[in-house]
Image (cartoon, rainbow, N blue to C red):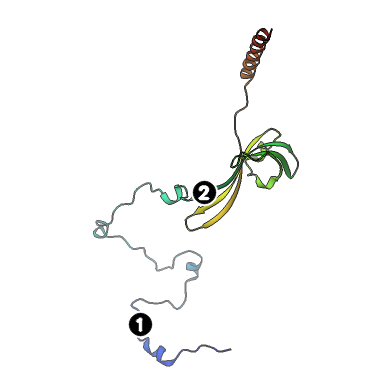
């Protein structure tokens, strides 16, 4: 194992001394966050402040607030309906929307695939969308994403259900009269 040694010629080339004093040791108050006893803050002169533009009161970090500029390339899309839910998985019937000629499939999906916000929506009869695709984000490369999103529609109100029942009863009478 070799050790590195400074040559004497390198040490000899440093002859200048700095224009400021370097303390032999730091004050213990400085280490703890306080100031040394002889510290006096500088007073800004008015001549220095003339050329300095004032900062705006409110500054927005546009790069943080803007959405990430990236691309998404869809590879596969399904519509699904939950059949039953177990403690760590759920069973669903999915319809292929990328290739509608394919038959529906029964799948079992792990609950871990759902976002925490969607967990309460995973009930028998719930409709969801499952997409798989590539996400390309600047500076982050490409990643494959599998995303399950549940449809969030408001349920029927009692008034709407009652109106639908009345309409169904009228249509039943109408079709009974036509068929006779």
Residue 97: tell me if it is visible.
yes
Horizontally, is 113 left or right of 142 in the view?
right
| Residue at the image position 37 percent from the left and 88 percent from the top | 13
**Helix, strand or loop under label 1:** loop
Between the residue at mark 2 and the residue at mark 1, the CA separation in whole angstroms equals 59 Å
Which of the two residues, 23 or 158, is positioned nearer the viewer here?
A: 158
- Label 2: element kind: strand
Q: Position of residue 55 (x, y in %)?
A: 33, 51
Residue located 71% across and 34% down the image: 124
Which residue extends farthest bottom?
Answer: 8
Q: Which disc number belongs to residue 101?
A: none
**42 vs 144: above or below:** below
Query: Within the image, what quadrant is residue 122 found in?
Result: top right
Report how many numbered discs are placed on residues in the image: 2
Identify the residue under disc 1: 17
Question: In front of the other: label 2 or label 1?
Answer: 2
Q: Specify the label residue 72 is tagged with.
A: 2
Give percent across and percent down for residue 38. 40, 69
Q: Position of residue 64 (x, y in %)?
A: 45, 50
* Quarter of the figure that contains the C terminus: top right
- The answer to whether the residue labelled 2 contacts the one labelled 1, judged by CB atoms less than 8 Å apart, is no
């Amino acid at each position: 194992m070799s050790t590195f040694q400074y040559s004497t010629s390198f040490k000899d080339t440093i002859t200048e001394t700095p224009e400021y004093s370097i303390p032999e040791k730091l004050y213990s108050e400085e280490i703890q966050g306080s100031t040394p006893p002889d510290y006096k803050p500088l007073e800004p002169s008015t001549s220095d402040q003339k050329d300095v533009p004032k900062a705006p009161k409110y500054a927005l970090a546009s790069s943080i607030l803007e959405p990430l500029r990236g691309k998404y390339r869809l590879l596969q899309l399904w519509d699904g309906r939950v059949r039953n839910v177990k403690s760590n998985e759920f069973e669903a019937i999915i319809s292929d929307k990328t290739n509608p000629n394919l038959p529906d499939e029964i799948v079992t999906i792990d609950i871990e695939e759902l976002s925490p916000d969607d967990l309460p929506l995973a009930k028998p009869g719930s409709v969801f969308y499952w997409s798989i695709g590539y996400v390309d984000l600047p500076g982050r490369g490409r990643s494959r994403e599998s995303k399950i999103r549940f449809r969030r529609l408001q349920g029927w109100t009692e008034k709407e259900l009652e109106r639908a029942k009345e309409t169904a009863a009228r249509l039943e009478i109408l079709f009974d009269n036509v068929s006779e």
